[in-house]
Amino acid sequence: MHMHPNGSHMINAEVKGKILLKASLLYFLDE
């Protein structure tokens, strides 16, 4: 699979966003 630098950067940003979203949801549920 051919990876473009911009593509991988966007994927990493998406993954980080999902992790932050999950972390914030867990934090609010834990409160």
Image (cartoon, helix red, strand yellow):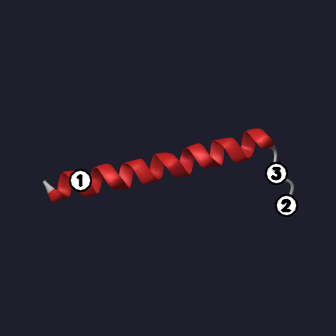
Q: Amino acid at mark 2?
A: Met
Q: CA distance from mark 2 to mark 1?
A: 37 Å
Q: What element does badge 2 sit on?
A: loop
Task: Compare marks 2 and 1 and give the one earlier in the sequence.
Answer: 2
> Residue 22, image x and y in percent?
36, 55
Marks counted in the figure total 3
> Residue 4, image x and y in percent?
81, 45
Q: Which residue is mark 1?
A: 27
Q: Residue drawn 18% across and 57% down?
A: 29
Q: Which residue is mark 3?
A: 3
Q: Amino acid at mark 1?
A: Tyr
Q: Is residue 23 above or below residue 13?
A: below
> Residue 7, image x and y in percent?
73, 44
Query: Label 1 neighbourhood size at 10 Å, few (<14), some (14-19), many (20+)?
Result: few
Q: What element does badge 1 sit on?
A: helix
Q: What element does badge 3 sit on?
A: loop
Q: Give left or right: position of 6 versus 26.
A: right
Q: Is residue 1 above or below residue 13?
A: below
Q: Give left or right: position of 22 versus 15.
A: left
Q: CA distance from mark 3 to mark 1?
A: 34 Å
Q: Residue furthest top?
A: 6
| Disc number for residue 1 | 2
